Amino acid sequence: MQINTILQYLESIAPLALQEAYDNAGLLTGCDNWECTGAICTLDATIDVLQEAKAKGCNLVIAHHPILFTGIKQVIGKNYIEQALIFAIKNDIAIYAIHTNLDNIAQGVNKTIAEKLGLIRTRVLLPKFNTLQKLVCFVPISHASQVVEALFKAGAGYIGNYSEASFSNSGLGSFKAGENANPTIGNKGIRETVAEERVEVILPFYLQKKIITALKLAHPYEEPAYDLIPLLNENQSVGSGLMGELAHPIEETALLTLLKKEFALSVIKHTKLRQKPVQKIAICGGSGSALIESACNAGADFYISSDIKYHEFFNANQQLVIADIGHWESEQYTIDLLFSILTTNFPNFAVLKTSVDTNPVHYFIGNNNY
Ligand SMILES: [Zn+2]
């Protein structure tokens, strides 16, 4: 199997088009037409992980964080990034990063955290705008269901937890075929009037090409008439963070204890407890200070994330409790997510989880006996 086959599958779940503008997700080293000898899932493509990949015969490293993130002008081994790149290229190892595109889907990084805490009624905390389009097309009634079916199959018609959403009404379409036309209905030079359906479906922008191709293939006319309209709607399935609820409210210390257990934490940094029960929980795996305000606005009792700076903790403002559980710690189950995505679709293929602990942050707990 070529590396490309694996990457195409990953991108059908977490399209590269959904990554943030500052990000660098995608294939970073290697060629997608290489035969894949095995894949290893990790948060970071450090040299230790690349050495592990080589030792275990895997020429594809699937990492959450892009090791090549900002522009570099030299690759001379002067830091851990350049050393990793040199090792990967010398040893024919492909590095693929699946980063904010995996953060921004409802079934991505944050879902793994929500599942560990048993959250229900989950939804994207800060949905993205400008990612949806409306397709309106005009189809002779005889072919309307065939066209709608083809549009659904290509990925149109998803609204939140609903699929196959469309609207249609009927009317009369007219056209006059020109000299070089090859009309399906009627004759050249004579205006034709046909009973047509006006079909409307919603689609994500990155599927536009695929869906228009499907429309043209399923539509009986030589020149199907259609409109593509950008929408201002929010996309409920795409965006940052996740909001969810515990089935029953619990004490704040019970939640902190649960976090310690489920994420194997030795310590949690948090703002002052409010002495109120917790039910609504906002989460953002990785650096999440940008979502504190959204968590407050969403009425969360608790916000679980990482990389919160001193002054940013003040933004809790007694409206909620901010808990910083550590960057690696918050994203650790992303490795299991990638492993499960790949093994489910490629059951007979060698997929591994790294056994290297790439967390660069360590905590000294001590025993107070000094
Ligand atoms: Zn991260």
Image (cartoon, rainbow, N blue to C red):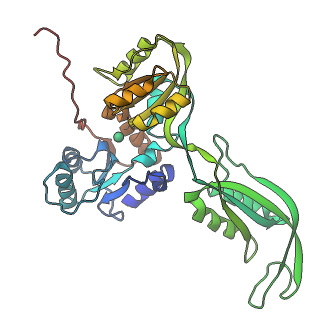
The C terminus is located in which quarter?
top left
**Horizontal arrangement in the rendering, residue 153 relative to residue 101 (left or right):** right
Q: Residue at x 88, y 85 (%)?
A: 190
Q: Count every numbered label the image shows and give the total.
A: 0
Whether residue 169 appears in this view of the structure is yes
As rendered, which of 266 and 73 lies closer to the eye?
Answer: 73
Residue 175 horizontal/vertical position (percent): 83, 78
Residue 249 horizontal/vertical position (percent): 54, 14
Q: Residue at x 33, y 21 (%)?
A: 268
The N terminus is located in which quarter?
bottom left
The single residue placed furthest to the top in the displayed view is 369
The single residue placed furthest to the left in the displayed view is 370
Q: Residue at x 55, y 58 (%)?
A: 206
- Residue 71 figure quarter: bottom left
Whether residue 1 appears in this view of the structure is no
**Horizontal arrangement in the rendering, residue 245 relative to residue 101 (left or right):** right
Residue 256 horizontal/vertical position (percent): 39, 17
Residue 117 vertical placement versus 31 (above, below): above
As rendered, which of 31 and 272 lies closer to the eye?
Answer: 272
The single residue placed furthest to the bottom in the displayed view is 179
Residue 93 horizontal/vertical position (percent): 25, 56
Residue 333 vertical placement versus 6 (above, below): above
Rendered-image quarter of ligand 1: top left
